[in-house]
């Protein structure tokens, strides 16, 4: 998409030809399903082969892992050997981590391997690197917390645990990790502001109706969507090949609902709404078909529900239509976070309207931008421009206008549904929604790429 954008801004000549060749080269890679890892392109077969090598190393380490467990529960002489055994086992784990076919996941696994090898300085360094690249993954803050507790820095470790539960406030595993972190903090530090805040966060949650006597051995890593368990003294088996970080712009259509680009929301494991420069709150994506809820045609949008804030919905009744020579605005944002973080807000004029009521605007989305809302000067939602996010299409797609009328059933659902669905693994907490004024909001989405099923 960045290559397409450069091409669009290049005048005819040698530079234009080179830009065209770059676009064609990337389109060919996208068609073949290739990805760039560590400066080189990997085919889907390369990815499968690398993950098989990772699993083989973990499998071959099981005997040493079993010996380590026996030593840890054995006589004092055996327990004295635990640290040496853990460091020896971590050598294999580091080799496995380096093999993973994605730079970010490889760094995460390297951090986990360093923890297993009691190298807390190295672990913190790797988790800090992960957080710098992807700050909204709770598992990375969890790893940082474990490394800091290992370094006997409990207040910093507790602060990292608080960051983790802020990202996954409805996770029982995140709550359990915060409680465990608080318990591991010395009693003479309980008056510190970090401990006071941690206790206040814990108090927000309802006490479970049933308590379990089961104690998990190992680590429940707080990966997006669902915790990934690792056996004691082992690395996790990640279900995803890699994480994908998207972004889009949403508009409020209900007190607790935003309408946003469906392509960006598809397969979302987690979503976060930027309320202001300092406040980011979690959201839940509505599961729906490509046709939306009650729609007879494919829609470029879908809903998110936001429990922690209350919006002022835009007018969406469709009474205001695009008119020739009227001024409107639309808001575009690069589909992936690495394409830039600034929302591109554009004032445009309606040059004309076709027989179907679709306006021709004086400006358009640029290649790589997801579906963007079109808003009238009075603040009414007129519709959305389809995203230009197809890497195989010219200029990323047509970016055509889709009127708000076609989204009526979806919007009605947003206006009558105000709560999350609950399920197994959800921690119940008390919420006092705060007002969130604004006509549009930036949304961060975490998705994942999973291994393709056989035959696909």
Image (spheres, helix red, strand yellow):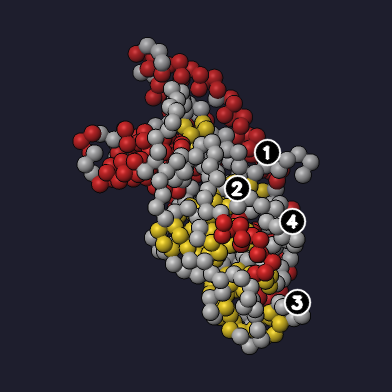
Q: Secondary structure at mark 1?
A: helix
Residue of label 4: 31
Where residue 124 appears, as percent x and y from the top left, is: 39, 42
Q: From what the image shows, is residue 339 above or below residue 380?
A: above
| Mark before the other along the chain sequence, 3 or 1 | 1
Give the distance between the C-alpha atoms of the residues marked 4 and 3, in whole angstroms. 34 Å
- Asked if labels 1 and 3 touch by Cβ distance under 8 angstroms, the answer is no
Q: Secondary structure at mark 2?
A: strand
- Counting other residues with Cα less than 10 Å from the Cα at mark 2, is it few (<14), some (14-19), or many (20 or more)? some
**Numbered badge on residue 360:** none
- Counting other residues with Cα less than 10 Å from the Cα at mark 4, is it few (<14), some (14-19), or many (20 or more)? few
Give the total number of marks visible in the rendering.
4
Q: Is residue 395 left or right of residue 103?
A: right
Residue of label 1: 49
Q: From what the image shows, is residue 159 above or below residue 302?
A: above
Mark 3 or 1: in front is 3
Q: Secondary structure at mark 4?
A: helix
Give the distance between the C-alpha atoms of the residues marked 4 and 2, in whole angstroms. 19 Å
| Mark before the other along the chain sequence, 2 or 3 | 3
Residue of label 3: 356
Residue 455's quadrant in the figure? top right
Residue of label 2: 448
Spot the residue most to the top: 75
Residue 314's quadrant in the figure? bottom right
Q: Quadrant of the N terminus?
A: bottom right
Mark 1 or 2: in front is 2
| Mark before the other along the chain sequence, 1 or 2 | 1
């Amino acid at each position: 998409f960045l290559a397409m954008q450069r091409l669009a801004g290049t005048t005819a000549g040698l530079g234009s030809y080179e830009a065209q060749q770059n676009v064609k080269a990337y389109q060919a890679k996208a068609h073949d399903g290739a990805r760039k890892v560590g400066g080189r392109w990997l085919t889907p077969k390369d990815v499968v082969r690398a993950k098989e090598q990772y699993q083989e190393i973990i499998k071959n380490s099981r005997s040493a892992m079993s010996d380590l467990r026996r030593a840890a529960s054995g006589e004092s002489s055996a327990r004295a050997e635990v640290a040496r055994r853990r460091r020896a086992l971590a050598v294999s784990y580091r080799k496995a981590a380096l093999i993973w076919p994605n730079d970010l996941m490889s760094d995460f696994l390297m951090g986990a391997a360093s923890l297993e090898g009691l190298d807390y300085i190295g672990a913190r360094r790797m988790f800090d690197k992960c957080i710098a690249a992807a700050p909204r993954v709770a598992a990375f803050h969890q790893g940082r917390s474990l490394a800091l507790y290992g370094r006997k820095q409990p207040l910093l470790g507790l602060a990292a645990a608080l960051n983790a539960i802020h990202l996954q406030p409805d996770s029982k595993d995140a709550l359990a990790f915060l409680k465990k972190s608080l318990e591991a903090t010395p009693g003479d530090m309980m008056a510190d502001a970090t401990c006071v805040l941690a206790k206040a966060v814990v108090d927000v949650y309802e006490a479970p109706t049933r308590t379990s006597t089961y104690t998990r051995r190992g680590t429940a890593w707080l990966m997006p969507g669902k915790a990934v368990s690792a056996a004691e003294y082992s690395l996790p088996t990640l279900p995803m090949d890699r994480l994908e970080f998207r972004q889009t712009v949403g508009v409020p259509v209900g007190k607790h609902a935003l309408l946003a680009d469906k392509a960006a929301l598809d397969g979302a494991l987690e979503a976060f709404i930027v309320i202001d420069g300092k406040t980011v709150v979690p959201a839940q994506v509505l599961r729906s078909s490509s046709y939306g809820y009650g729609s007879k045609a494919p829609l470029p949008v879908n809903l998110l529900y936001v429990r922690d804030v209350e919006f002022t919905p835009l007018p969406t009744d469709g009474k205001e239509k695009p008119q020739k020579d009227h001024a409107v605005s639309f808001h575009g944002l690069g589909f992936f976070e690495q394409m830039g973080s600034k929302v591109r807000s554009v004032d445009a004029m309606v040059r004309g309207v076709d027989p179907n009521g679709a306006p021709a605007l004086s400006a358009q989305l640029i290649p790589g931008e997801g579906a963007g809302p079109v808003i009238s000067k009075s603040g009414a939602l007129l519709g959305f421009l389809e995203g230009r996010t197809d890497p195989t299409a010219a200029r990323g797609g047509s970016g055509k206008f889709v009127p708000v009328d076609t989204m009526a059933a979806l919007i009605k659902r947003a206006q009558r549904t105000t709560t999350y669905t609950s399920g197994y693994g959800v921690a119940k907490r008390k919420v006092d929604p705060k007002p969130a004024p604004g006509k549009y909001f930036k949304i961060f989405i975490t998705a994942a790429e999973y291994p393709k099923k056989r035959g696909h």
